[in-house]
Amino acid sequence: MSTLDATRAELALIVLYLNKAEARDKICRAIQYGSKFLSNGEPGTAQNVDKSTSLARKVFRLFKFVNDLHGLLSPVPQGTPLPLVLLGKSKNALLSTFLFLDQIVWLGRTGIYKNKERAELIGRISLFCWMGSSVCTTLVELGELARLSASMKKLEKNLKNSDKYKNEEYRGKLQKSNERTLALVKAGMDIVVAVGLLQLAPKKVTPRVTGAFGFVSSLISCYQLLPSPPKSKAH
């Protein structure tokens, strides 16, 4: 493959990535929380960027609650333990509620919905829903990691006389384990961000702490949305 072909392929992946509304939302989220970190809650340019980006992101999330509503009604994989099923469905319900209520918050911020006090209350309720969904995600990922670990140990016993890293099934499970570990870290960070936005521990979780955790969490989201590079053909 020539340098020009390689460059074209890389640009195609970037275009594919930026064509996703979710990816653009997460890039804006990184800008938002990066600005929050810089401003530390103080008035100025960084805080203006934080507020304006926060409002702009709400447009990307219009009708996004349907995605988790669909997840709530979709069947779960066979063999999933009941506690994990219930936690997963609770996560979908809470996230769908957050995204639905967030649309009312957007209407309040733009001046279409006139009752500011109610819009603020709905905003707090929506953030509690988001925090609840992040807690559910954390517990689901912990449960799934425990299941994966058990199945990997069982597979290791069967492969004790061969290189486990050459086994396709083992490599697949290892990749899933890495992905779930990353999702667990992100969910934990999102809980801290929610605590900061709700000001539940204002002395410990300051705007700067909220911004730092939100920024790193956003970078993880951006990484998770990266398209897989095309596999090179064997000659």
Image (cartoon, rainbow, N blue to C red):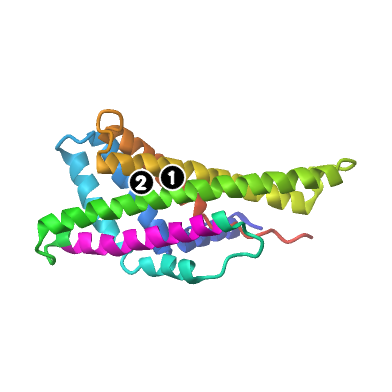
3D distance between C-alphas at marks 2 and 1: 7 Å
Residue 107 spot, x, y in % from top left:
18, 64
Q: Is residue 109 magenta?
A: no
CB of mark 2 within 8 Å of CB of mark 1? yes
The prevailing secondary structure element of the residues shown in magenta is: helix
- Which region of the structure is painted magenta? 84-107
In this picture, residue 5 sits left or right of residue 134: right
Q: Residue at x 90, y 41 (%)?
A: 161
x%, y% of residue 103? 25, 64
Report whether residue 28 is seen: no
Residue of label 2: 30
Residue hosting label 1 = 219
Q: Earlier in the sequence, mark 2 or mark 1?
A: 2
Q: Is residue 227 left or right of residue 126?
A: right
In this rendering, the answer to whether 158 lies above or below 82 is: above
Q: Which quadrant holds the N terminus?
A: bottom right
| Residue type, numbered disc 1 | Leu
| Furthest-left residue in this view | 114
